[in-house]
Image (cartoon, rainbow, N blue to C red):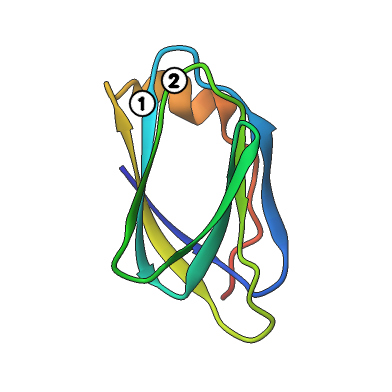
Amino acid sequence: MLEVVAESAKPVWPMHVHDNEEEHFIILEGKALIANGDSRAEVRCRFVRHLGRGVAHAWCNPSEDALLRMLVLFTPEDSKNCSEEMPELSLPT
């Protein structure tokens, strides 16, 4: 599980695929724009979005003035695989 904080109006994560894990986004603050295959959804605080394995997906913070804070849960968890795929993120200080 990761806690992610993303600044406003900055693309953070490019389209990618997890062949072995499902991904769950739990929005704690703000909102996320999540692309999942051909669909797009804006997910607000207190909502959860499930993404199945093998489907291309991406996310960003679409807000112009608010932080996005969320938990990202991978099932089954493969933390070695997760850390190898993770690009460096620019997080607020």
Q: Quick one: 30 or 86, which is closer to the camera? A: 30
The earlier-in-sequence mark between 2 and 1 is 2
Mark 2 secondary-structure assignment: loop
Q: Amino acid at mark 2?
A: Arg
Q: Looking at this view, name the residue that lies furthest to the bottom.
A: 65
Q: Position of residue 4 (x, y in %)?
A: 45, 57
Q: Quick one: 22 or 93, which is closer to the camera? A: 22
**Quarter of the figure that contains the N terminus:** top left
Q: Amino acid at mark 1?
A: Ser
Residues under labels 2 and 1: Cα distance? 15 Å
17 vs 88: above or below: above
Q: Quadrant of residue 76?
A: top left
- Residue 79, label in figure: 1
Q: How many marks?
A: 2
Residue drawn 63% across and 76% down?
Answer: 63
**Quarter of the figure that contains the C terminus:** bottom right
Q: Quick one: 14 or 86, which is closer to the camera? A: 14
Q: Would you name the residue on which mark 2 appears?
A: 53
Mark 1 secondary-structure assignment: helix
Q: Position of residue 25 (x, y in %)?
A: 38, 49
Q: Position of residue 8 (x, y in %)?
A: 65, 75
Residue drawn 36% across and 26% down?
Answer: 79
Residue drawn 41% across and 20% down?
Answer: 80
Residue drawn 38% across and 21% down?
Answer: 21
- Residue 69, label in figure: none
Number of residues whose C-alpha sits closer than 10 Å to that of mark 1, classed few (under 14), some (14–19) or many (20 or more): few
